[in-house]
Image: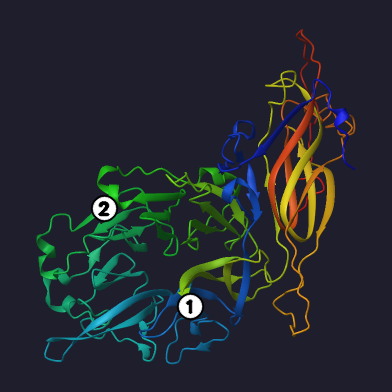
Amino acid sequence: MAQSDTILGTGRGVAGGAFLIDGMQSSNDPMFISERGIRSAMNVSLRGGTASTRPGYQCRYTLPAGRLQGFHKFTPTGSVLHHLAAVDGRIYVSKAPFTSYFQLPNIRFFPGARHIFFENAVKSARRNADGSITAIDSVNVVMMQDGFSRAAFWDGSTNRHLDPGPGALETPIGTVMKFTGGRLWVFDRRRGYSSDIADPLSFTENTYLAEGLPFQLPDEVTAATETPSVDNPQLLVFTESTGTLFQSNVRARSTWKDIDNFQRVLYPEIGCVGHMAVTTQYGLLWWFSSRGLISLNAAEASKISSELPYRDNDMAVSKAFMSSNLADIALTSYENFLLVSVPSGDRYNRHTWVLDQSPQTLLSERAGPAWSGIWTGIRPVQWAPGRVNGVERLYCASVDYDGNNRVWEAFTADCLDNGTPITSYVESKSYFKFSDKASGLDLKGFRFAEFTFTDIVGDLDVRVFWAGTRGNYQSLASYRFVATEGSLNSDSDITADTVISTYSGQSRRQRTPAIDLGEFSRCGVESDLSDGVDTAFSVLLVWSGRATLRNFRLFADPNDESSTGECHSAESGAKVLEQGLEESPQ
């Protein structure tokens, strides 16, 4: 039931949130989050300052059961985008538009390997039996390794395991790989090898050039990436605790021995947790170290020290529950979003952190980035962006909660997960400035809340919770809003006589009932006052369906306080509070 405006007394104060472009700031005390920030959020996009239900996930196909060891994108020469997925040592291939898949013959890796590593390369030369080199038409190849079996490759037609043989004539066994400077770099624990120029399948130079000996790294290699430089991209190789730079842009191998710092440790105390935990976006290199997320502007690399700032402090509410094993963290970028899939509260990547580089679009300048919170629903093992029919798309392989391995497309416009409504929430900061008579750290009595949803399509279920600075969230109200959809759906049968109805998205502005301040009590453990009397209050809005939370407000009354001090006796006996969210929506 809507509240009458007549209840707004002269002392009643109002606080609230709108234009939430500062995003999630869970590392700050809830009272000191910025006015345009929030404490936490799940499954929302904060683009434009409003909190909208995130884009959807659509299942494209289900992979065979077993250990999901890797996922990759590859485009054979003259063909379209393909997916490669590794399950129990077998390689499965799906061709756009990804409606079916087949097993790649002749290739079998160790079923117990934790990861199977993929790397795209280009072969444009062939070494002849007499040692001479012949240029050939460029052919795209994808290289595969598991650290145990012989390396393998596929070029869209030919596929086989490679035999390094005496002197490592073909690709040696390894794990992490990177194709840069026209060469394939292969790393086997602490050793690194570089292929012949323009031929990722040949490593004959290692057998007769002094500078062809293996490179030694400080520890076992965890990841390798190309620095995002247009002119001189170089190779950055990580262990768990170090980052080593190779001047891989120098193509003449015979000159490597004469180049100062051809190999140098750039970051002696900052490494990368795994080969999937590194990506690039807008000239920035992002990777996940053992202590958190880091970004590097390669254009300014010569001006920075080895102390790089961590960029994930605002995700503390998820980071606090991370698994101790971070090797499977997966990063990717898509449009203006950076996605970081992490094992928070799970052995798999249950949470995907979403950093929006453009929460506010400006014509004259670029607004600062902001965390949109966490996205849930699937557990990505590895991401694979790619272009299909001229449209940039994003796919991932996931170990889902039912135990099945599936390939999903992200960022579908329907804002549904396989046709199912998405559950989202926004948790506000703790507001303590309400009015002149209920401001600052003065005690005040929380009364009710108000919120506005727009762009509602279909049924929308909403729950509203409130909390002070102590105690759990209390249920305030629940609602169902019905915004009837149009009649045109993907499975509709349309004839010449079909009447097609389309309806606009709807909006609702709703004020909750007022609470009874004496109804909630912490039984004198933390305070003799009711939970409804406190210095600051926050709200938690949870919804299931397609909608946009435009704004919300909290209403509170001033509360008289004594102007004198008081005595306090020592506490004794057990003091216990129950934990958890009362009547939790999760």
Reading the image, the residue beneath label 2 is 265
What x and y, as percent, mark residue 506? 75, 55
Q: Quadrant of residue 163?
A: bottom left
What x and y, as percent, mark residue 471? 77, 35
From the viewer's perspective, is 432 left or right of 523? Answer: left
Q: Of residues 49 and 333, which is closer to you in this image?
A: 49
Q: Quadrant of residue 133?
A: bottom left
User: Is residue 479 at least partly visible in the picture?
Assistant: yes
Residue at the (41%, 43%) spot, across then down: 309
What x and y, as percent, mark residue 481? 82, 55
Q: Is residue 204 above or below residue 331?
A: below
Q: Of residues 367 and 521, which is closer to you in this image?
A: 367
Which amino acid, by three-letter code, is at mark 1?
Answer: Asn
> Element at badge 1?
loop
Which amino acid, by three-letter code, is at mark 2?
Answer: Val
Disc nearest the viewer among 1 and 2: 1
> Mark number for residue 389?
1
Q: Of residues 492 and 384, which is closer to you in this image?
A: 492
